[in-house]
Amino acid sequence: MVRSIDDERTIGGRYDLCGPRVLTLKELLAYTAKRLGKRVWILGLDDQRSQLMARILGKLPGAPITLDNYRSMQTPSVCDEHNGLLQLGIHPTDIDTIVPTYLGG
C-alpha cells in the first residue's frame, strides 16, 4: 500500500497480491500446524457438508466460519500472470521466508 499512495498510476487500480506458490487451504492448515509443532487431523468435507457447517457455526458468537466465508472460498484466491506485487516493483516472497518470523520454528 505504501508504494501506491504517492503513485498516480495506481489510482483506481486493483492489485492481486500473491506469493510465488499456490497452496490449498488444507496445505496452509497443515503448514501452520507443523510450524506450531501441533499434530492435527484435517478432515475434508464435501461442498454440502461445508455449507451446512458454515450455516451452523455462523450463528455462534465469534463465528469461526460464516456462510459468507464459505461463499468466498468457492472462488480461488490465486494470481495469474498479473501479480500486483510485480506491478508495484515487489518481488513475491515464499511463505517459508516470512511465516517462521511470526509463528516460530
Image (tube, rainbow, N blue to C red):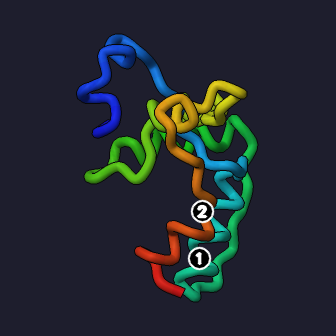
On the image, which quarter does residue 82 sit in? top right
Q: Is mark 1 on a helix, strand or loop?
A: helix
Image-quadrant location for residue 40: bottom right
In the picture shown, does residue 81 fall above or below 78?
above
Seen as rendered, the residue at the extreme top is: 12
Write the residue at 59% across / 76% down: 33
Q: In the image shown, does 85 or 57 lie closer to the viewer?
A: 85
Residue 58 versus residue 37 in the image, above or below: above
Left or right of 61 on screen, residue 20: right
**Mark 2: amino acid:** Ile
Name the quadrant of the C terminus: bottom right
Q: Residue at x 53, y 31 (%)?
A: 84
List the residue tagged with mark 2: 95
Secondary structure under tag 2 reads helix
Count the marks: how many?
2
Image spot of residue 8 (x, y percent)? 30, 15
User: Picture coordinates of residue 52 (x, y %)?
Assistant: 57, 39
Q: Where is residue 48 in the image (x, y as percent from the top left)?
A: 69, 36
Q: Where is residue 90 in the image (x, y as percent from the top left)?
A: 51, 43
Q: In this view, does 76 lie to the left or right of 6?
A: right
Q: Please report the residue visible at 70 percent of the width from the left and 36 percent of the height from the top.
A: 47
Q: Mark 1 points at which residue?
A: 33
Q: Say if mark 1 contacts mark 2, CB within 8 Å.
A: no
Residue at figure coordinates x 64%, y 84% from the top left: 39
